[in-house]
Image (spheres, coloured by chain):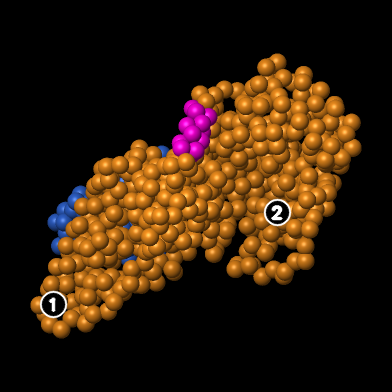
Chain colours: A blue, B orange
Amino acid sequence: METVGREMVIENEMGLHARSAAKIVQVSEKFESQISLYRDGNVADGKSILDILTLACPKGSVIRVEATGPDAEQAIREIAGLILRGFEEK
Amino acid sequence: MVNQSDIHDIVLQGIAASPGIVIGKTYHVDRGEMKIIYEYLLNDVQVVQEAARFEEAVEKTRNQLRVFLEEVPEEFKDHLHILDAHLLILKDRMIYDETLNTIKKEQINVEWALKITLDKARAAFSKIRDVYIRGRIKDIEDVVSMILRNLAGKGYEDITTIKDRVIVVAHDLSPADTSQMNIDRVMGFITNMGSKTSHTSIIAQSLQIPAVVGLERATDRIGNNQLIILDGSKGKVIINPSEATLEEYSRKKGKYEQYLADIVRCAHLPAETIDGYRVSIKGNIEQLEEVTAVLDFGAEGIGLYRTEFLYLSSKTLPEEEELFENYREVCEIIAPQSVTIRTLDLGGDKFASNLELSDEMNPAMGLRAIRFCFKMQQIFESQLRAICRASHYGNVQIMFPLISGVSEIVRAKEILRKVQADLTRERIPFDEDLQVGSMIEVPSAVAVADLLAREVDFFSIGTNDLIQYSLAVDRTNEYVAYMYMPFHPALLRMIRQVVASAKREGIRVAMCGEMAADPLCIPLLLALGLDELSINPHAIPLIKRIIRTSTLEESRDYLSHTFNLNTARDVKTYLTEVVTKRFPEELAPDGTPVM
């Protein structure tokens, strides 16, 4: 099984709050791969909004996003894109 | 419930939360806490059945949420993301999988399993430091309670299915409740709980739906589908009204609606006297939700944003991020007009849960407002950072409360500059031309207004405290409250002095106390030369109307006559007579507004 990972910085003003966490879940769910978010030794399931919220990532947090599964590469590309675009917040 | 069909005109008195009169049928929205019982499942068949019950309830809840999402009224489009989050929470593994597992492993009923799930979520969220994220537990509770309602077969009371418009009667209403109601069907709100500033009141005011709150036993005393009169202006509910009462209130309602129509027509006209003297009328607010009402009533910005609410609404101090988001939103909605944010005006006694501060004998003269902020400089700096950051997104002004002399304003400005230097270093944008003002509410500040005027961009006279401190009267003390008199000759002279000092230095001078919303005072304030009045949003239409039908010339005559009078009583008698005669349509003979 393929695992792809990428380190990212949360740059949007609000950090990973309800709206941005919801967007990650909505993207993650399109993929068969298992998605995990790591921060400071804690891990959250990318398909669980509550898990992501409890990871508590304010602006400036460094996180690692990992995907394991047949469509891992595409999943990471889309999630990374979402984070890079600051979740399309203005 | 008592059979009340024979007794007419039973009057319940509550808190007038949102003005207006409606006559209509009641509709009970039951939001009571549900009792959850524990059941042990005896065999695997029961476990399978229980799991199926859970899945069915979740499915129902999901459909209800989807319907809400499609039918969210225009006014609540901002809340859409909450419902989106609710949908995700519903199938989140921390809720869905967790509950299913608990049913199977522990062999217990769904309700009890849900309770365990919720307890676990509460434990997980209570450890989170970020206040905003910690607060999301409320969303989980809302979702769980929807599932529980479906399990109980109660469904979600769907107000959209009612044909007629109704008056909603409830114990209390949460933001989720009101956002899921079809507001077009709601003529009025009645709740047992609540105050003038609680959520229901603010929503009702901003949607201009009459409401009476704090009725304590409304849900017991008012039946379902019962004809009642709701008078939101007076805080009254009349159960089983007689023909005569119905007629009387229909008349009042007609008059009030006429008055509202006039307001809507005139709200956005400038506050300019017949002879062309223009003042700026702004609104006072305490919460974000009030901003829309401010605009509807024709305010030209927010002249006083009291910032205490976020500090009092939770047990812990709000973090910079939460404050910033709040201020930014206010400033974005009100833009291009300005918002004047007053820094924290609280005493140490309000922070008992967080800070160890000793009790004070005389809190009004104790450690409060700017003095408290100097002592707790971290709290102050965090607020200033939030305000400066928000200033990047609109037109923000900052104002310091309880300034008693030059040294305090200098020190407050130093701290502000330090915060701004930090932001520059961190490359966080803010408005570098942010205007800074001083509240004038301590008599010594009046005495040195000429010196203070050189330090700030504007003054804002806070009459409530200025009266209390100048006359040495605590207006909450029943023995001396009668001495609390806005019309005191001393006060008028102090205002004159402050305005003169401001004009000499060429700075703006505003007034933000209750006096600025008293129709009897308006001619005096015009003649005294105030540039700006900031008042309760609901008072704006009336005050504008009075200004628009006044002349500066006659106001000056009233003022010069007033300055020859010796006592507060003489001033009040004189003004009541001349002003009510001059504005007979707007004011009753005692000087109070007709509406």
x%, y% of residue B483? Answer: 80, 50
Label 2 crowd (10 A; few <14 / some 14-19 / many >=20) = many
Q: Which residue is mark 2?
A: B369
Q: Which residues are magenta?
A: B247-261
Identify the residue at image location x=57%, y=58%.
Answer: B312
What is the chief secondary structure element of the magenta stretch? helix
Image check: B543 left or right of B446?
left
**Is residue B415 in view from this perspective?**
yes
Assess disc 1: are there few (<14), some (14-19) or many (≥20) residues with their C-alpha within 10 Å of its C-alpha: some
In the foreground, B437 or A79:
B437
Q: Residue at x 25, y 46 (%)?
A: B161
Is A48 drawn above or below residue B168 in the view shown? below
Circle 1 sits in a helix, a strand or a loop, which is it? helix
B129 vs B464, left or right, is: left
Mark 2 residue element: helix
The image position of residue B19, as x and y in percent, is 52, 41
Looking at the image, is A2 positioned above or below residue B257? below
Q: Nearer the viewer, residue B254 or A7?
A: B254
Q: Which mark is residue B46?
A: 1
* Residue type for callout 1: Gln
